[in-house]
Amino acid sequence: MKDDDLLDFAGHEADIIWSRYNAMVVADTIFIAAIAAITENTCLAFAGSCVGIILTAIWWIVTSAGWSLSHAMLHAIGNEGKAAGTPLGVYQAWCSRVWPGCYADPIWWLAHAVIGLFYLVYAALAVYFGGLLFGSPFLALITMGLAALILLCAMLYLSLVRFSVAN
């Protein structure tokens, strides 16, 4: 592929990332409102919270994979010439201002922080409704908190290690 084709493809992938991101922000907001509206049905609210956790985890992973693909396209363009003026050189210089040696820009971190916030809201709802459903808020907190922490760590690991440009 030519550099122009790669750059167009990277731009197209960025458009897809933000389209998916905007759709998921709206969908998650509506889904949380729906869970709040059915609080009298504890079982359904708990199930909805668990589904929200899973959907948010999938959103995180798909977003990370899309970002990785965009980075791979920029990396392919940058391999031809390591000049600072290439799209890869500009991007790496911009990223290193925030976190030296990291190939994830501040927008990546902020976008994932919003996804993580939705994830934590769903986890808190699952703990709350799980406590009501199973009769022990403490047991629900420990179980769901541990599960949420493990899943969040796995998502962060996949995002930063498995979906890196080097792979």
Image (tube, rainbow, N blue to C red):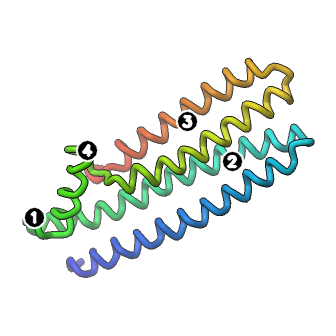
Say the numbered circle drawn on residue 52.
2
Residue 19 point in image, percent of width and height: 52, 70
Q: Which tag, 2 or 1, sits closer to the chain's start?
A: 2
Q: Is residue 56 above or below residue 142?
A: below
**Spatial distance from mark 2 to mark 4, Cα to Cα?**
31 Å
The residue that label 3 is drawn on is 151
Residue 11 point in image, percent of width and height: 35, 74
Q: Which tag, 1 or 3, sits closer to the chain's start?
A: 1
Residue 97 point in image, percent of width and height: 21, 50
State if disc 4 and disc 1 touch (CB < 8 Å): no
**Spatial distance from mark 2 to mark 3, Cα to Cα?**
13 Å
State if disc 4 and disc 2 touch (CB < 8 Å): no
Closer mark to the observer between disc 3 and disc 4: 4
Q: Residues within 10 Å of mark 1 (few under 14, many from 20)?
A: few
Q: Residues within 10 Å of mark 2 (few under 14, many from 20)?
A: many
Closer mark to the observer between disc 2 and disc 4: 4
* Residue drawn 67% across the image and 61% down it: 27
* Residue drawn 15% across the image and 62% down it: 89
Inspect the image, locate mark 4, and give the three-letter code of the amino acid beneath it: Trp
Q: In this rendering, would 114 be left or right of 24?
A: left
**Spatial distance from mark 1 to mark 4, Cα to Cα?**
18 Å
Say the numbered circle drawn on residue 158.
none
Q: In this rendering, would 22 be left or right of 131?
A: left
The residue that label 4 is drawn on is 99
Tally the numbered discs: 4
* Residue drawn 73% across the image and 38% down it: 125
Q: Nearer the viewer, residue 125 or 13?
A: 125
